[in-house]
Image (cartoon, rainbow, N blue to C red):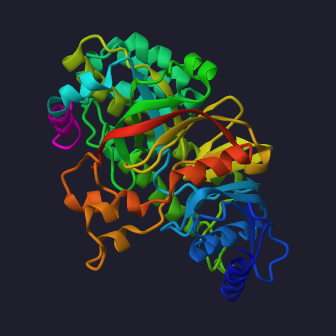
Amino acid sequence: MQPKLNRLLRALAREGLDVTYDGRVYSVRLQGDSNAPPAEVLLPPELPVEGKAFQQLAALAALKHPGGGRVKRVRATPDFHPGDSGVAIGSVVHTEGLVVPAAVGTDINCGMRLHVADLPVETFLARRDAFVERMKGHYFFGTRDVALGSRAVEALLRDGLPGWLLETMEAPLGVVARADLGQLDRESARVYLGGALEGDPAWAPTGLRREGVVRDPGLATIGGGNHFVEVQRVEAVMDRARAWEWGVREGQLAFMIHSGSRDMGRHVGNTWRERTRAAWPVGAPLPESGILPLVEPERVREYLRAEATAANYAFLNRLLLAELLRQTLRELFGDVEAPLVYDVPHNITLPWEGGWLARKGACPAEAEQPVIIPGSMGAASYLMVGQGNAEALVSASHGAGRARSRFSMARGGADRREEALGLTGVDCITLRAERRIEEAPAAYKPIGPVVASQVEAGIVREVARMAPLMTFKA
């Protein structure tokens, strides 16, 4: 290990980084910037090191603004990899006196939602084709009937799920009119922060701000990238007492949803990328990284309100994706309760220890809080419980993390054999053949060491493990 590690450290030094490794955590800093805090990366030795991701983390830690504020700490989870916007996926940054919109990006409140159902897997698979045809209609062909009254939309954007539900109970429409509204109300306690942030409808695109019935094309949609809806089987329970408390038992059917704020998040993210650049002090040199923070208190408040508005939308998007699936199970199999286990965000900025904690592709892992860590569509996913580890900035990975880019998977010279891609036996439902290749298991890091390293570090503990049965990719 040592000769290989020394070669790696020398290579990173040639890229302008000071790096040390203690066998568990890398410490990374830009050369010549001893005033910046080092970025720390929890990474087991068997997982690959990506120089570009290290550069992005170090640049984030070195971020400064002429008007003040500071970055206090930067940490990355073991699924970290380079991000397209200059901030590595898996980054967690603690700031004081400034916020960093790019540290969340445009996929605001991308997150995970997990349900379980007391439905035998064999019974479900016996009607697999009928289930798939219905879900393809909902997710891909627009047969979903998602309609909201304008007052419900306004309440959602301003107050989150509780506001939406209160207005919706007055006059439910479409798919929600067929839902068990009492169950949705009870399940709000199993959403992180209750699914309620302080937003402002003024930050929504004009298409959402109209009178009468609103049919927004982004609601109840999966999205691209690594987003998915997956049906799984609970194959093992490691913490039986906690799993029982959460309603999880071995042999159950489960479904996991990974999606975010769609066009709403893009609208807010792109708007604030432009506003943040326009707010940069005239004559002050721009950071080489291109990452710009906000420091003026009023702008910070405005940005956080806009981000919260998109986050509220994302909570409802995941709820509706789940409700379409739950109602389809009920159509095919009768009275299936399929309760929510938990819904947790990834890309979000929240107050923490007198400053702000921004996560980009990382999951909150507070003490006793459910944590959901998916594998690839050919590997297990995990339900964990957070340990509130302050050293890890109370954050866990949001998945296994990419090992290969979508471009490298899709290029002409790539090995397209099923076994090479890890797709043997994988039931992937998508309308685009290239999505199956771009998102193949071979594109992702092995989930085992990602999870084990976080258990060993005291960030999370295992509760249950789920095996994939089928995965929907838009």
Q: In this view, does 307 lie above or below 417?
A: above
In the visual, does 166 lie left or right of 279?
A: left
Q: Main secondary structure of the magenta part?
A: helix
Res. 354 image quadrant: top right
Q: Is residue 301 visible?
A: no
In the visual, does 307 lie left or right of 467?
A: right
Magenta region: 131-144
Residue shown at 74% from the left, 48% from the top? 457
Q: Quick one: quadrant of the N terminus?
A: bottom right
* Camera-side residue of 149 and 263: 263
Membership of 70 in magenta stretch? no
Image position, residue 368 (x, y; %): 68, 28
Residue shown at 51% from the left, 66% from the top? 83
Image position, residue 119 (x, y; %): 33, 19
Membership of 135 in magenta stretch? yes
Q: How many labels does the image show?
A: 0
